[in-house]
Amino acid sequence: MKKLILMRHGKSSWDFPVSDIDRPLQVRGIKDAQLVATEFLKSNSKIEASFSSPANRALHTGMIAMRTLQLPFANFLISNELYDFSGKSVMDFVKNLDDNLTSVIIFGHNHALTEISNLWGDVYIENVPTAGLVQLNFEIDKWRDTSGGRTEKMIFPKQFK
């Protein structure tokens, strides 16, 4: 079995004259990332590796979640493929993961994460909100066979406010 956890970056700020990749999180984005990660921590899920888009807002969300989940930063890798908004590059990335990994988390962007959740999960999600987390489980041995999984968990900040 393989477990894929997708977490969208927290709410970002448009208040600074920076490029898209450099946009920071708002205070709300920081708080929501902590809130969702704290709730996910209760599931006692084992995560073997973490991957993030190189975008500032995704990296910051990932660092907050990793610290909250008490995951080692040594297993935190950045990939340009995850700076994707369609989902194709992220799906290719997942299909090329090391088969020795059974449980991974990816910090990324919409529309990609909503698209993947709907293509690979069994529950329709209109929109994965900022700092939203979706866990998909697959009855497979090899990541390249990823498709038609089960939507195991959805944690969205609005559920806890």
Image (spheres, grey):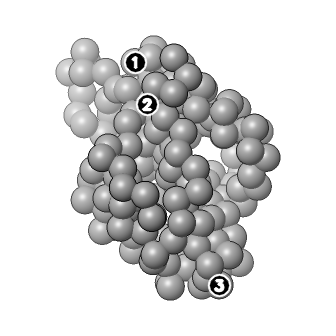
The three-letter code of the residue at mark 3 reads Asp
Relative to 9, residue 28 above or below: above
Do the CB atoms of the residues marked 2 and 3 lie less than 8 Å apart?
no
Measured in 3D between alpha carbons, the distance from the residue under mark 2 to the one under mark 3, in whole angstroms, is 32 Å
Badge 3: how crowded within 10 Å, few (<14), some, or many (20+)?
some
The three-letter code of the residue at mark 1 reads Gln
* Nearer to us in this view, 38 or 159: 159
Measured in 3D between alpha carbons, the distance from the residue under mark 1 to the one under mark 3, in whole angstroms, is 39 Å
Q: Is residue 29 left or right of residue 126?
A: right
Do the CB atoms of the residues marked 1 and 3 lie less than 8 Å apart?
no
Residue 74 x, y percent position in the rendering: 71, 51
Residue 150 x, y percent position in the rendering: 54, 66
Per the image, the residue denoted by label 3 is 141
Badge 2: how crowded within 10 Å, few (<14), some, or many (20+)?
many
| One can see residue 5 in this view | no
Residue sitting at x 30%, y 68%: 88
Q: Nearer the viewer, mark 2 or mark 3?
A: 3
Residue 113 x, y percent position in the rendering: 38, 53
Per the image, the residue denoted by label 2 is 10
Residue sitting at x 43%, y 42%: 8
Q: Which mark is residue 135?
A: none
* Nearer to us in this view, 27 or 116: 116
Per the image, the residue denoted by label 1 is 26
Residue 56 x, y percent position in the rendering: 41, 35
The three-letter code of the residue at mark 2 reads Gly
Relative to 118, residue 129 above or below: above
Q: Secondary structure at mark 2?
A: loop
Residue sitting at x 53%, y 45%: 154
Residue 104 position by quadrant: bottom right
